[in-house]
Amino acid sequence: EEAFSARGVSLLPADLLVALREAGANPLLLRLRQGEPAAVLEAIERAGRESVPVAERIRWIRLLGELRASAAVDFLLTLVRTHGPLDPRRVALAALAEFEEPRIGAALAGTYGDLPAPLRPVAQGVLSSRPGWIPPLLGLLERGGVTAGELTAEAALRMEATRDDELKRRFLAWKARRVPRLNEASRQAAERIRRELAQGQGSPYRGEPIFT
């Protein structure tokens, strides 16, 4: 199981996967690629086991996201809420961005206030990455759960660019009340992120404050 990339395994021919299985050389990574439910549960167990080295746990967490294993959603949400090492929690947040389930947005918004500061920009990136998850993020803004000072440039621009006219109206109304003006550094950051979004770039792994 040297290769932990779901994308790498996806390049293997189907007949090779079958041959490996018939020969008994079917490690967990390949079983996951073949969609075995038991393999997903085993990967979740490894990813959550504290005795497993952090680097290996991170690889399994990222893999569960790459494979969009729906059975892993509850595990990933629980991991985000734990008080363990930050790196597995950060990767779990990013892995959640691979899914589209509506409940993820509400769950992340509900736990946002308990997240440590380094994870909050990542959470904003995830919440703003799906149109269906923007309402919970906007609700946090309106309730003061996310302040103008910690709102990231990427999340702000995604909300401003939403195709939902009502959500855009609410965000712009909040922005007019809370952010009367931007300093020059914030303007430059906003312009850079706007260019990246226009080119289809951007990442839930990062986030930079735009408002001061």
Image: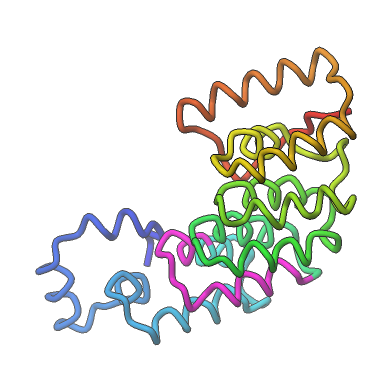
Q: Residue at x 19, y 59 (%)?
A: 12
Q: Residue at x 38, y 62 (%)?
A: 2
Question: Residue 13 in magenta?
Answer: no
Q: Position of residue 193 (x, y in %)?
A: 62, 26
The front one of 170 and 44 is 170
Q: Position of residue 62 (x, y in %)?
A: 51, 60
Range of the magenta residues? 62-82
**Residue 28: quadrant of the picture:** bottom left
- Structure colour scheme: rainbow
Quadrant position of the C terminus in the picture: top right
Residue most toward the bottom?
A: 38
The front one of 82 and 52 is 82
Q: Is residue 87 left or right of residue 198?
A: right
Quadrant position of the N terminus in the picture: bottom left
Q: Is residue 119 left or right of residue 33?
A: right
The front one of 20 and 104 is 104
